[in-house]
Every structure is written in structure tokens, then in C-alpha cells.
Amino acid sequence: MSEGTTPTESADTEPAVGETGGEALGPVPVLAVVGRPNVGKSTLVNRIIGRREAVVEDVPGVTRDRVSYDANWNGRAFTVVDTGGWDPDARGLALSIAAQAEVAVTLADAVLFVVDATVGITDSDEAVVRILRASGKPVVLAANKVDDQRTEAEAYGLWNLGLGEPYPVSALHGRGSGDMLDAVLAALPEPPPEREHEVGGPRRIAIVGKPNVGKSSLLNKLAKEDRVVVDNAAGTTVDPVDELIELGGRTWRFIDTAGIRKRVKEASGHEYYASLRTTTAIDRAEVAVLVIDGGQSISEQDIRIIQTIREAGRALVIAFNKWDLVDDERRYYLEREIERELVQVQWAPRINITASTGWHVDRLVPALDKALEGWETRIGTGALNAFLGRLVAEHPHPVRGGKQPRVLFATQAGTAPPVFILFTSGKLDASYERYIERRLREEFGFVGTPIVLQQRPREKRKR
């Protein structure tokens, strides 16, 4: 195998100048909401987060795309994980309710156990309670569907579960939810103070990808010789510990993740949480390294992970692993796949590696530096508008319906990722927006980072 850069790799990367990160992404505590199907978990989640986001349907085992939600109570932020979407019986999966609860408890800092007060204690409830007791995690017991004084008296029969005081609530009407949330805050740990000062600390790198593509092999190869410390960061929601690793004379925080096998709404218990951990790791990171098996076709799962990274606004490096198994024929087809499947992320640095032997693993740090540099690039307002003036003059927006919208002014509203606000005389076509993004990259670089363009069309004056 030639040691030189192959056509699959992007141009040589150069180290970034800056060393400081964007705003801190310190983790907030995680609350898992568990219970039997149809006890009102999703309705209660909507009540907690103050908006209708969790899918609510009077059918056990309703699937949903979103599984975690940001919540805030009395000025304290926490993440709510709704486990209501993965009932094994309703979805034909051979997983017990106890196994589901066990995975949820492993992930969370505290558990909100929801029971239907109008039904009382069932065998399934008692099975979950055994798991909760064994976990040692703090548990808040919510007696749901308590809509009146009579049902409230029935709710106190739940003392017999042995989980302490049941909090009578009506997820539908909000009754008693304040007391329950006060108990939740008391059960959740305070965010670790050292995380509040993470700006300027080790750069955070999430290693993501499908199962069995070599993510852990890459991490092990990086950590083998220069491991600094294993940091089981409090309050984080990833199962594998973060690795603080010395590379290129600097310390980096690597976050290893479980692979994504299926869409979240199709995933069984453990896979459901593997997907959630991957998403959480991406949210915590500054750069995501997507590991792809070079010997396999680029899959829908790879594209889906890329979409998650773009939506999270994180920098991206793509590592094609197992390159020692890629022959000339596979390289030819891989180049075609890259042109076809990765057209939306042509800006991402690409490296070819063999993690098991360490071949070209040293190319990761320059690629990370380049991606971070692009992620944090800021363009001065004067230079930006001079550039846009030239662009519009050379290639004006097409006339649509007798009108020709123009870019009047632009400003960069933020970095990490770069966000630009375009003040226009009318709404720009999506194709023209893509043209502006492409020219921005040609002019200013922005290697390794998504770019966010926001339009502010001028409002028509009312006569």
C-alpha cells in the first residue's frame, strides 16, 4: 500500500492557530422516565418540559423519533429521557420490561418511576422496582392519573412499593407536578462545577460510527502509549469513560460511543440507548470523527450520523478505516461513492487509516486542527460584505416572478459553527443559498465545519 495521499483523501491539513473552544458544553443531569406502557409517561414528559413534543397516543408502544428533551425547573436545567417508545410486546421485541428499565437506569442520574394510580401495583411494576432498588440510583415515584381527591387517597397505596413517598400527579391537568419536580431536583446531582470552566480545556472529540468499524480500535491505538488518565466524568450520559490522551504535545478528550445499528424508533432497548449515547456524545463534542469501514459501501446509517453531526453544528472529520483491506477496485468504487453520497460534506477533511496497525493514525491530529480552525473562523463585517458585493455583481440572483431578490447586508452572528445572517430584499432560492455557501468556502476556507445561513428578508412597508 502506498504511503502517499490517495485520491480518497482530502488535501493536506495544517494545524490550527487557536487553542480555545467555543462555549462550554458541560453536561446536565439526566432523568429517565420509566414505567409500564400507557401509564402516561409521554404526557408527563410534555408536562415537565412545558411543551408538546413527546408523541402521545392512547396505544401502548407508540414509537417516536425524539427520545431526549431539555427541561428546566426553578432555574436548574436537566435532560428528560422518555422511555415510552420501546414497549417489547407492542413492537415484537423479545425484551422484558425489567431489561428495559435496567438499561434506562444505567444511563440516568435519577429515575422518575411512573405508575397508574387508578390501576394500582401490577406484577410488571414490581419487576421494575426490583431493578430500581438494585441500581442504587435515586428514584422519584410518580402516581399518575390522580385527577381528584378520591384518586389521591388510592395513590397512597403505592407506599407498598417500598420506594418512599408517592407523588400524586395528573400529567393531563398538571395537578401536583410542582411537588414532584421539586423532588426530582432533590434527586438529581448538581452539575459538576469544574465542567463550567471547560472553555480552554482539552478539545472534545467524539468518535462515532456504525458498530464494528473500528472506533474502539482507533481509541485504543491513540491511548496505548500516551494515556494520561481515564476520566469517568460525573453527570455524563455516555457509558464508556472519556479518555484524556496526549497527542501532538497536547491533551485531547476523546469520547468513545456505541454504534448506531438502526433508526432510533426501530431500535430495541440496548440499541435505542446506543443511539442516544451517540447523539449525546456528538452534542458534548466540538469535533466528531466519523469512522467508516473503507472496505464496505457507505451506508444509510453513515449518512444518518453525518446528518446528526450537521444538525448539531459540530465540526467533522471522516476517517476511512481498515485501509489495508482496500484494493484498487474497491478504491475506484469508494471514490464514486464519496462523490455521490458525501456531496453535502465535501468540506470535511478525510483521512485513510488502519487503526489496528496504527498506519496513518498520526494524520488525525492535523485533520482535527484544521476542522477546529474552520469551526471557529470569524470573518470581519467589512470583508464579508465586500466579498458578497463582488459575488452578487458577478452572479446576481435569478429573476423570479418579475422580482430579483438581492443581498443587502450580511453579518457573522457567531462561530462554532459559523452562523451568517443575510439581510435581503426578498427570499433567496435554496440553490442561491448553496451558491453563497460554496463561494464562502472557496474564499475563506471553513474546512471541516457546517455553515449556517439565516435569511432576513426585508418586510414590505404597509401603506
Image: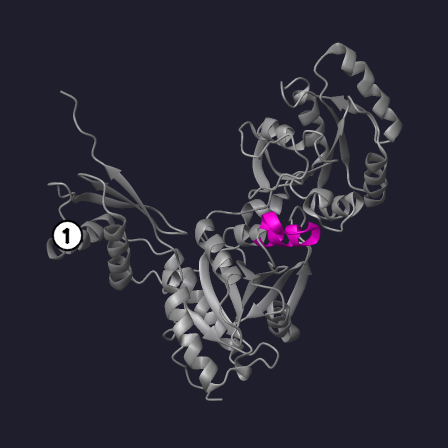
Q: Is 22 or 8 nearer to us in this picture? A: 8
Identity of the residue drawn at 19% across and 43% down: 409
Secondary structure character of the magenta stretch overall = helix
**Residue 360: within the magenta?**
no
351 to the left or right of 77? left
Q: Residues within 10 Å of mark 1 (few under 14, many from 20)?
A: some
> Badge 1 is on which residue?
392
Total labels: the figure holds 1
Q: Which kind of residue does numbered mark 1 sit on?
A: Val
From which residue to which does the magenta span run? 264-278
Vertical placement of 325 versus 341: above or below?
below
Identity of the residue drawn at 47% across and 67% down: 318
41 to the left or right of 335? right
Vertical placement of 326 versus 338: above or below?
below
Furthest residue toward bottom: 1
Viewer can see residue 16: no
Dividing the picture into quadrants, the one containing residue 456 is: top left
Viewer can see residue 461: yes
Measured from the top left, where is residue 368 in percent x and y? 46, 66
426 to the left or right of 334? left
**Residue 276: within the magenta?**
yes
Identity of the residue drawn at 11% across and 54% down: 393
Measured from the top left, where is residue 323 in percent x and y? 52, 80
